[in-house]
Image (cartoon, helix red, strand yellow):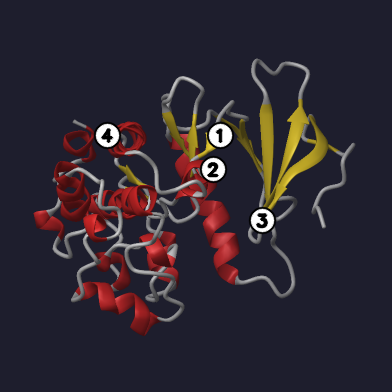
């Protein structure tokens, strides 16, 4: 169920129908008299029975989004008081989720390269602001009609100017298991090359239609990527060019020092 009823007015925002209901939050269209662009309100599922990490993720996302700007992220508008009604109001970006492309995978190599370059460029713009996403996956990437990528869902992010509330709360790996970097699995949340690893996992998925490390459900399954290499993409998608396989596998190196050092170099 939606956590805020349509028609409710919250701090000057009139809440519309929900456009997405996820496990962690509900997204509503909202309007305000002075708005200059379409708006979304994200309302986290916080209440009895919900994990404490949900509250912390909300606080992280509100803090990080307020510090970000530029075309690779939705514009931040407002955040609610967690003690009254937690919410984040942001720009409703005219874009399609990258998940739509992942659902059609395997894709032609030129399309994988185009999407990968757009994603890496967006991640570079994020890293320039001393932020690391740490939860990149096709569902958290939007693609504008012009082909540019936009990153969403910063609940697990790390920002160099703020305390890492999630690291203070837990030592367990946090993130989306198929895309999580080896260093995240052992508790390191401060390396921008973790996002490069996640881009590699997304590119592997787009190129082959498979996930490089499957869908591990426990910590033991996650740790396998610390010592086991993925099946080379060309063993699955035989028409994949060698140069694209080389890019993907370099992103997926266990040791971050062997990956592309920056997302900008990966985009190039």
Q: CA distance from mark 2 to mark 3?
A: 17 Å
Q: Which residue: 16% across, 36% down?
A: 265
Q: CA distance from mark 1 to mark 3?
A: 17 Å
How crowded pointer 3 is (Cα within 10 Å; few <14, some 14-19, many 20+) is rated as: few
Q: Work out whether residue 178 or residue 110 is closer to the camera in this orientation and state it.
A: 110
The quarter of the picture where residue 167 lies is bottom left
Q: Are marks 3 and 4 in contact (CB under 8 Å)?
A: no
Q: Are marks 2 and 1 in contact (CB under 8 Å)?
A: yes
Please give the residue where the numbered disc 2 appears in the rendered image: 100
Q: Which residue: 65% across, 15% down?
A: 36
Tag in front: 2 or 3: 2
Percent position (x, y) of residue 154? 48, 48
Q: Secondary structure at mark 4?
A: loop
Q: Earlier in the sequence, mark 2 or mark 3?
A: 3
**The C terminus, quarter of image:** top left
Please give the residue where the numbered disc 4 appears in the rendered image: 128
Q: Secondary structure at mark 3?
A: loop
Q: Which residue: 43% across, 35% down?
A: 67
Please give the residue where the numbered disc 1 appears in the rendered image: 96
Please give the residue where the numbered disc 3 appears in the rendered image: 22
């Amino acid at each position: 169920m939606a956590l805020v009823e349509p028609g409710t007015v919250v701090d000057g925002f009139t809440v519309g129908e929900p456009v997405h209901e996820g496990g962690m939050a509900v997204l509503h269209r909202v309007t305000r008299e002075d708005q200059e662009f379409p708006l979304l309100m994200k309302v986290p599922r916080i209440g009895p029975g919900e994990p404490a990490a949900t509250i912390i993720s909300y606080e992280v996302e509100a803090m990080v989004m307020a510090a970000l700007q530029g075309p690779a992220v939705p514009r931040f508008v407002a955040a609610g008081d967690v003690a009254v009604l937690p919410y984040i109001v942001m720009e409703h970006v005219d874009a399609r989720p990258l998940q739509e492309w992942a659902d059609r995978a395997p894709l032609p190599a030129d399309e994988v390269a185009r999407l990968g370059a757009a994603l890496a460029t967006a991640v570079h713009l994020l890293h320039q602001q001393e932020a690391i996403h740490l939860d990149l996956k096709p569902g958290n990437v939007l693609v504008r009609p012009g082909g540019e990528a936009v990153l969403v869902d910063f609940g697990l992010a790390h920002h160099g100017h703020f305390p890492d509330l999630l690291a203070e709360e837990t030592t367990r790996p946090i993130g989306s298991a198929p895309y999580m970097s080896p260093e995240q699995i052992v508790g390191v949340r401060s390396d921008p090359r973790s996002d490069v690893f996640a881009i590699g996992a997304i590119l592997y998925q787009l190129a082959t239609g498979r996930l490089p490390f499957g869908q591990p459900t426990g910590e033991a399954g996650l740790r396998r990527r610390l010592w086991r290499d993925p099946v080379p993409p060309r063993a699955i998608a035989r028409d994949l060019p060698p140069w694209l396989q080389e890019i993907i596998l370099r992103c997926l190196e266990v040791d971050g020092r062997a990956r592309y050092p920056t997302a900008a170099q990966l985009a190039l």
